[in-house]
């Protein structure tokens, strides 16, 4: 055996700024490549599904394969509307931040199908949202869950503007929503914590013999965190009704997915390593996402335990309003992404199946834009981060302790409250 120099291996992305985007590492199989096993399948039997890519929509916009959920045109149009609303709303949030009206903004541009398809699939079999029932433990890039589950766009906007309509009274960073009545747990900005929270929620539901589903959301970068692995141990051992969603959008802020260990294998295979049934899904294919989540949800509700899903997608925009992606990747990388744009792909499907025309889709976009702009105007009337009534200083003492300790009571009194 030939000897090699001992050296540290530091993974490098396939292209840097100024270079041609290179996604040759991503193998895109035909839509008929992935089989659909029974929901009671053993973990080891899903190994092939952790290495391929579950797809329903082909490059021409036609649906096929065993995973085709057969959704009707009305349902697909609703899904498209939710994706468009999510995209336009977050676009406005970013503009508000750039105008100095919001402190922070974050987008899910190019990833809208992930949240929307999941919300639709879970909602189709859910007994209803609320405490003790289905619950998503999201990251800051799952606003589509709220849009799909009917949360007020006005309240979402007020939270981003930090105005008097903010239901959280400024206690969270803008964009980090908390809407438990919509099955949307409080967002933690530090990814990884959602995994153990969701597993714990699912374990509690199983103890109470409830047919609930908890859904954890995290990014591929956070799979290198201890919380992720701790959560998978508990999910594997106790078999609670939890779906562990890893959104692989290729970049954890400025660190590409290879830094987290995605260079030689899929993140989905980590589920197999913990004896968890695992699926790897085209995250820009709404039908594939719906089908995969439906499979995992049925599995959880029927008492067959957890599932790990890797969503392969691409963060088309900056990580947040504090980030400039042109510093670490080619400016045209998103346009070169092999799995395309989720809004365009679903629109194409509706056209090729005769369910919509270019004209009707343009009308849908215009109606969504009008709705979003009306919401923005209404919310700005209540103020922004730099205008309108300000929260009382007493708010900083609330929502931390069930019983306020004496030293904080003393500090509050010193402020005159």
Image (tube, helix red, strand yellow):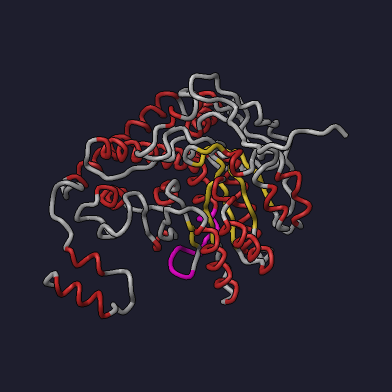
In the image, 185: left or right of 199?
left
In reply to whether residue 412 is colored magenta, the answer given is no
Q: In the image, which residues are magenta?
A: 122-132
Closer to us: 308 or 82: 308
Q: Residue at x 44, y 60 (%)?
A: 183
Task: From the viewer's side, name the closer residue of 196 and 335.
Answer: 196
Q: Quadrant of the C terminus?
A: bottom left
Decide: is 397 above or below 98. Answer: below
Residue 3 picture location, percent across and down: 82, 34
What percent of the width, then of the height, locates residue 386?
17, 46
| Residue 281 locus on image (x, y percent) | 62, 42
Quarter residue 233 falls in: bottom right
Relative vertical location of residue 50 with respect to residue 7 in this rendering, above or below: below
Q: Quadrant of the N terminus?
A: top right
Q: Is residue 129 magenta?
A: yes
- Horizontal side of 97 relative to 136 (left or right) equals left
Residue at the (28%, 77%) spot, across then down: 404
Q: Nearer the viewer, residue 377 or 109?
A: 109
Q: Main secondary structure of the magenta part?
A: loop
Residue at image x 55%, y 37%? 256
Expressed as whole percent of the image width and height from the top left, the position of residue 48 reads 76, 44
Tell whether 380 sits left or right of 306.
left
């Amino acid at each position: 055996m030939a000897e090699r120099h001992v050296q540290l291996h530091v993974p490098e992305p396939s292209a840097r700024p100024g270079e041609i985007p290179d996604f040759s590492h991503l193998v895109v199989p035909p839509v008929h490549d992935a089989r659909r096993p029974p929901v009671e399948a053993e973990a080891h039997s899903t190994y092939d599904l952790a290495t391929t890519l579950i797809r329903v929509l082909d490059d021409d916009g036609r649906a096929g394969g065993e995973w085709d959920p057969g959704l009707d045109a009305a349902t697909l149009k609703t899904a498209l509307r939710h994706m468009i609303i999510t995209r336009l709303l977050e676009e406005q949030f970013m503009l508000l931040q750039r105008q100095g009206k919001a402190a922070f903004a974050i987008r899910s541009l190019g990833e809208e199908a992930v949240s929307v398809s999941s919300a639709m699939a879970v909602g189709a079999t859910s007994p209803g949202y609320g405490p003790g029932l289905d619950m998503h433990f999201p990251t800051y890039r799952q606003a589509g869950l709220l849009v799909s589950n009917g949360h007020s766009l006005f309240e979402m906007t007020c939270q981003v503007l930090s105005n008097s309509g903010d239901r959280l009274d400024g206690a969270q960073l803008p964009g980090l929503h908390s809407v438990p009545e919509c099955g949307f747990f409080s967002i933690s900005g530090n990814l990884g914590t959602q995994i153990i929270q969701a597993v714990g929620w699912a374990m509690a539901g199983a103890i109470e013999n409830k047919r609930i589903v908890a859904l954890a959301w995290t990014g591929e970068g956070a799979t290198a965190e201890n919380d992720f692995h701790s959560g998978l141990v508990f999910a594997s051992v106790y078999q609670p009704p939890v779906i562990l969603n890893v959104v692989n959008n290729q970049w954890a802020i400025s660190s590409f997915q290879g830094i987290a260990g995605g260079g030689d294998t899929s993140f989905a295979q980590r589920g197999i390593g913990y004896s968890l049934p695992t699926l790897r899904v085209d995250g820009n294919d709404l039908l594939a996402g719906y089908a995969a989540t439906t499979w995992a949800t049925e599995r959880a509700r029927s008492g067959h335990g957890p599932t790990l899903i890797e969503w392969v997608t691409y963060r088309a925009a900056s990580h947040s309003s504090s980030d400039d992606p042109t510093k670490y990747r080619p400016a045209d990388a998103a346009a070169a992404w092999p799995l395309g744009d989720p809004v365009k792909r679903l629109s194409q499907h509706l056209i090729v199946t005769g369910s919509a025309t270019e004209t009707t889709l343009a009308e849908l976009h215009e109606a969504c834009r009008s709705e979003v702009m009306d919401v923005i105007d209404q919310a700005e009337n209540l103020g922004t981060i730099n205008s309108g009534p300000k929260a009382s200083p007493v708010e900083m003492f609330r929502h931390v302790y069930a019983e306020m300790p004496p030293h904080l009571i003393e500090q509050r009194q010193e402020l005159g409250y």
